[in-house]
Image: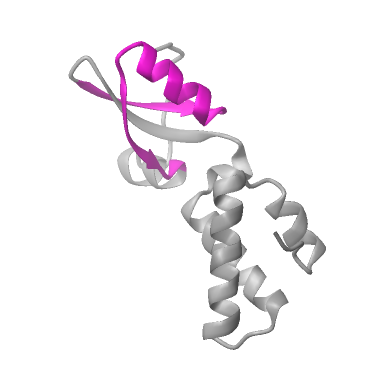
Amino acid sequence: MNIPMNTLVSDMVNLLDESLREDFEERAGIIEFDAELPRGHAECLALLDVLQRYPHVLTGATLLQVKLKNSVYMGLATDIDHARQYLKNIGGVEIAFLNLKDVIDHQFEGICRIDIAHF
């Protein structure tokens, strides 16, 4: 894989897991060649695209919607692989990744209470 030209982009790309890094590389290549932009510009746009779709990269936390015992819950996770395994072990099913800001803004009018509980 290529090392991004811009040091800030490079530092942020280093936060991506292998799958997201591949997504970034593919997106940067498409933008560079289809839009005929310089590689550095294409990498910046590709990184913005990845971060917009996967904001957990910056926060280190992922908001998941899960189903457990016929009820739907939202949960925060810092290690998505561990969370998926834990859910599997207790009979839970991951439904979707959610954008934390959108959930707080639209479902809770900008502020919400977080109760401490384990699944």
Residue, x 77% and y 53% (percent of image)?
11
- Camera-nearest residue between 46 and 118: 46
Give the residues in magenta. Answer: 71-100
Q: Residue at x 54, y 58 (%)?
A: 23
Residue 79 shown in magenta: yes
Q: Quadrant of residue 58?
A: top right
**Can you give x and y, in whole percent of width and height, for residue 17 in the image?**
61, 43
Q: Pick the quarter of the image with the N terminus.
A: bottom right
Q: Is residue 104 above or below residue 45?
A: above
- The color scheme shown is one colour
Q: 104 or 63: nearer the eye?
A: 63
Vertically, is 96 above or below 31?
above
Please state if 33 lies on the left or on the right of 105 as rendered.
right
Residue 47 place in picture, x, y as percent: 61, 62
The quarter of the picture where the C terminus appears is: top left
Q: Is residue 114 visible?
A: no
Q: Looking at the picture, tell me which residue is in the foreground, 105 or 43.
A: 43
**Which residue is pictured at 60% across the width and 46% down the height?**
18
Count how many numbered circles sit on residues in the image.
0
Nearest the eye: 29 or 98: 29
> Where does the image place residue 24, in percent across and percent down from the top left?
58, 60
Q: Is residue 54 above or below residue 33?
A: above
Instruction: Measuring from the top left, give residue 82's x and y in whole percent.
Output: 52, 22
In the image, is residue 18 part of the stretch drawn in magenta?
no
Residue closest to the far left: 70
In the current view of this chain or complex, which residue is farthest to the bottom? 36
Q: Residue furthest front?
A: 1
Q: Is residue 118 left or right of residue 11?
A: left
Q: On the image, which quarter does residue 70 sit in?
A: top left
Task: Name the residue rendered at 60%, 40% in the picture.
Answer: 59
Instruction: Answer yes or no: is residue 102 visible.
Output: yes
